[in-house]
Image (cartoon, helix red, strand yellow):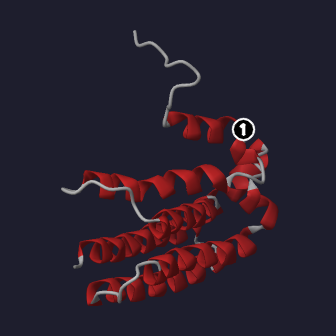
């Protein structure tokens, strides 16, 4: 039987637990997603041969992608969530507005990677960001057509394209 850590000890699961127990039904519902995704670049940079904290623009890009993912992740569950009383920010804004907000957040995540580095973008990064932009457009089309699950899958593909751009920027001289 494992011991639970003291309340002041860091516990990454608390964000998910807090979301499920309380935050998903509040206007603050995107915050756990933003926080968790913002930490992902740190895993990449701290695991590299020359471990370093990620730049602020990478943390911002992760947070924006995470918040965007929250908005598309809820689309397919709006009817079920209404029955169970879940009223997070996407539910309060409605499906159509949530699609637009998701697209803005996802696109802004790509922009953070494009303008964050102090040097010109490598060709691979520019190509990945162009693919990401096309995927954001597909998220909008799927979301507005009422295909929430497809919109979420396209959101994951968008995040993948932005990660490729991030890695291209991070690995370039």
Most foreground residue, 42 or 162: 42
Residue located 72% across and 69% down the image:
95
Residue ranking furthest to the top: 1
| Residue 14 falls left or right of residue 157 | right
Q: Position of residue 156 (x, y in %)?
A: 44, 66
Residue located 22% across and 57% down the image:
50
Could you say which quadrant of the image residue 159 lies in? bottom left
Q: Which quadrant of the rendered structure holds the C terminus?
A: bottom left
In this rendering, the answer to whether 162 lies above or below 42 is below
**Circle 1 is placed at which residue position?**
22
Q: Position of residue 41 (x, y in %)?
A: 39, 59
Q: Position of residue 149 (x, y in %)?
A: 53, 65
Q: Position of residue 70 (x, y in %)?
A: 60, 59
In this rendering, the answer to whether 84 lies above or below 60 is above
| Residue 47 falls left or right of residue 159 | left
| Residue 12 falls left or right of residue 41 | right
Most foreground residue, 117 or 103: 117
Residue located 50% across and 77% down the image:
112
Residue located 64% across and 73% down the image:
146
């Amino acid at each position: 039987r494992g011991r639970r850590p003291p309340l002041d000890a860091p516990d990454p699961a608390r964000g998910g637990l807090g979301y499920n127990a309380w935050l998903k039904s509040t206007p603050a519902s995107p915050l756990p997603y933003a926080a968790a995704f913002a930490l992902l670049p740190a895993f990449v940079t701290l695991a590299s041969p020359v471990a370093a904290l990620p730049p602020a623009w990478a943390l911002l890009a992760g947070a924006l992608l995470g918040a965007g993912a929250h908005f598309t992740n809820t689309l397919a569950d709006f009817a079920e969530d209404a029955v169970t009383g879940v009223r997070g920010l996407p539910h309060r804004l409605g499906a159509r507005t949530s699609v637009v907000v998701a697209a803005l957040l996802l696109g802004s995540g790509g922009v953070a990677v494009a303008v964050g580095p102090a040097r010109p973008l490598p060709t691979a990064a520019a190509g990945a960001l162009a693919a990401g932009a096309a995927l954001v457009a597909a998220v909008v089309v799927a979301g507005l057509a009422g295909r929430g699950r497809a919109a979420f899958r396209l959101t994951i593909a968008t995040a993948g394209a932005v990660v490729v751009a991030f890695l291209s920027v991070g690995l370039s001289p």
